[in-house]
Amino acid sequence: RQVKRSYQSYGFCVKLSAVVVLGLCFIFVWSIFSSFSVNSRRESFDDILAESVSDVPVHPSKKEPRDKDQERELEHRFNSRLGDKDDNALNVSAPMKPEKGQENDGDSKLSKRGGGGEKNQENDGDSKLSKKDSGEKNRENGGSEEREDNDKEGEEADEENSDGKSDESLEEDSDSINTEDSNIEADEQEEGDNGGGLRKANKKKLGPVFDPKRRYIWKSCNTRSKHNYIPCIDIEIATTKLHSYRHRERSCPKLDFTCLVPLPRDGYGGPVAWPESKTKIMYRNVAHPKLAAYVKTQDWLVESGEYLVFPQNQSLFKGGIQHYLESIEEMAPDIEWGKNIRIVLDIGCKDSSFSAYLLEKDVLTLTLGLKDDLVDLAQLALERGYPTLVTPFANRRLPFPSGVFDAIHCGECSISWHSNGGKLILEMNRILRPGGYFIMSTKHNSIEGEEALSTLTSSICWNILADKTDDVSDIGVKIYQKPESNGIYNLRRKKFPPLCKENENPDATWYVSMKTCLHPIPEAIEQHGTEWPAEWPKRLHTFPDWTNNREKLIADSEHWKAIVNNSYLEGIGIDWSTIRNVMDMKAVNGGFAAALSEQKVWVMNVVPVHAPDTLPIIFERGLIGVYHDWCESIGSYPRSYDLLHADHLFSRLKNRCKQAIVIVVEMDRILRPNGWAIIRDKVEILNPLEEILRSLHWEIRMTFAQNREGILCAQKTVWRP
């Protein structure tokens, strides 16, 4: 009892003293170790920021502390990535020395490998997420937002191509670019100054686009598709559980694509020049077992010695392709090939006779080779010289803007348009021009399928112009027309599918899922698709009111016309009789393609997804193109193009790709042996790039530099590691 009473008297004081002592001890220990731990975190974070893309998005406005386990895991990821990059190294000779006054210029540029760099931090508020970190839902909304967030970059790119002065030599050509690029750099500097305290606080400078000290060792790809490998579409490694050759949807390899696709087993022969390639191609350039088995069952292509021959009087369409197209014109007299119909999308690659016959009428047909084309008929079309794109067609939007195709054709169509909630037909409605035509031919379609398709087309207010079975070919042909105004949508009894919300961007396509809604038809004068374009060829140089800056577009066309006529066609040694398939890797308004319109070539205009959305303008001019992110491989077969044109592509892709070398590897994949590449960019980019191309055994045919700007012209060889 006495002890208890004494404890009650002094218990409170003992407890209070113990709490004070423990508190002082905690403060003492924390003050010793806290500064060390915080500093170590920051040092590790800066190292990751400077060297590689962090797996966690960087948010400059809010930095959450990480415990030691998270730090160890992050450091382990960083070290493993460095190991992967070292494994993919390639052997190059010493880089060329930059011009005087440019030695330190590369240090001021932002590194492409540093995906979480300063520029990404500056734009973090705009929700620009890394492709590796963001899920599909974020990617769906990212395509349009990213293009909108780069309006300034688009204005700079427009200025870069808008000089209307006549160039008479490469030197004058370079002068015009130098002036424009200096303005671009000033705008970039001004943009950096407007970045606030964040840019000033983080003064760590990242490396150049290409590391001039890095050595590369090239390796051949060892994949299931071998010499026909298409990354992001083909499955890389075969397994016992997986029997398909291609992904159901676009799915890129986890590691960066840095290997070189081998040549065909029997070697590669020079492609047959246009227009002779319309009737025959070199067989060994496209040969593989499934195609060999297919050739034996067909009469529209015949093996003849070392060639595959395409008889002109043979076609998959019974009665001939000419009879088939003439019957379509009889069913729908408003369809005038080569006049009001200029741009056509052909779903599912067949024998290319559809594209070949329409080309003679000045109709440019883009063939869509689907993922289940294991015979690789799309590759035959590219080898013959017809525009073709390979892509899955299941749940995601096609890489085209809305309302740009004059007509869409699906010959001997076996696609279940009514399945999956009718998403596929709604996607056709999205990309079809108001008043455009959807032409479908089938053989012996089921009654259930006919009824489902009829119900679906009625629900989206398509007007059926013809439904007839041809007596000669025994093919049923249906021709639909998309409405030209929104008034008919309000007359529907059932509002299904519903109209899309106003904030739903119909032109957002990169990794965006198909929608089960109808996009309203444009009616405002500032929207594209409100008027039908002029007839070809007047259409090429006619700019509608919604383009806003008609004078700049005209100047851009004159600028590229002068460059092509005075430099590309005469001054750099290209034999244009061997050029048929051309790609503009960073098209702006289609000026380069328009300047080549009188040549016997076709141009695939690629608008990067991070750049301003100018692809509708390109289609409006009667040209074709796609959206694409050059950090990934494009949907095309190896050895598809004769010439690649890249105007300031690399300098515009800073801070987007983990390694800029993947773009060079992709160029090597899609360019044919003896094909050409014309690259225009800054000298600090062209110097190390030239050494990389030499390591690939490309022949450097011409280089020209003046005032920090340059042009590099190179030719690929047949070398493989």
Image (tube, rainbow, N blue to C red):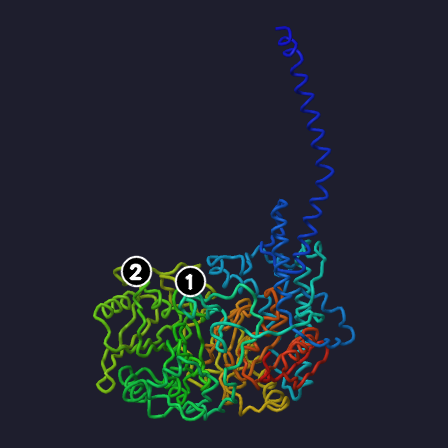
Q: Is residue 318 left or right of residue 24?
A: left
Q: Residue at x 24, y 70 (%)?
A: 450
Q: Is residue 110 above or below residue 465?
A: above
User: Hey, what amino acid is under mark 2?
Assistant: Phe
Q: Position of residue 403 (x, y in %)?
A: 41, 72
Q: Nearer the viewer, residue 534 or 461?
A: 461
Q: Residue at x 66, y 53 (%)?
A: 45
Pointer 1 residue: 513
Q: Residues within 10 Å of mark 2 (few under 14, many from 20)?
A: some
Q: Is residue 43 above or below residue 338?
A: above
In the rendered image, is residue 573 in sight?
yes
Q: Residue 198 is drawn in which quadrant? A: bottom right
Q: Is residue 267 left or right of residue 119?
A: left
N-terminal label among 1 and 2? 2
In the rendered image, is residue 616 in sight?
no
Q: Nearer the viewer, residue 407 or 176?
A: 407
Q: Quadrant of the N terminus?
A: top right
Pointer 2 residue: 496
Q: Position of residue 430 (x, y in %)?
A: 39, 68
Q: Position of residue 465 (x, y in %)?
A: 26, 77
Q: Nearer the viewer, residue 76 or 366?
A: 76
User: Hey, what amino acid is under mark 1?
Assistant: Ser
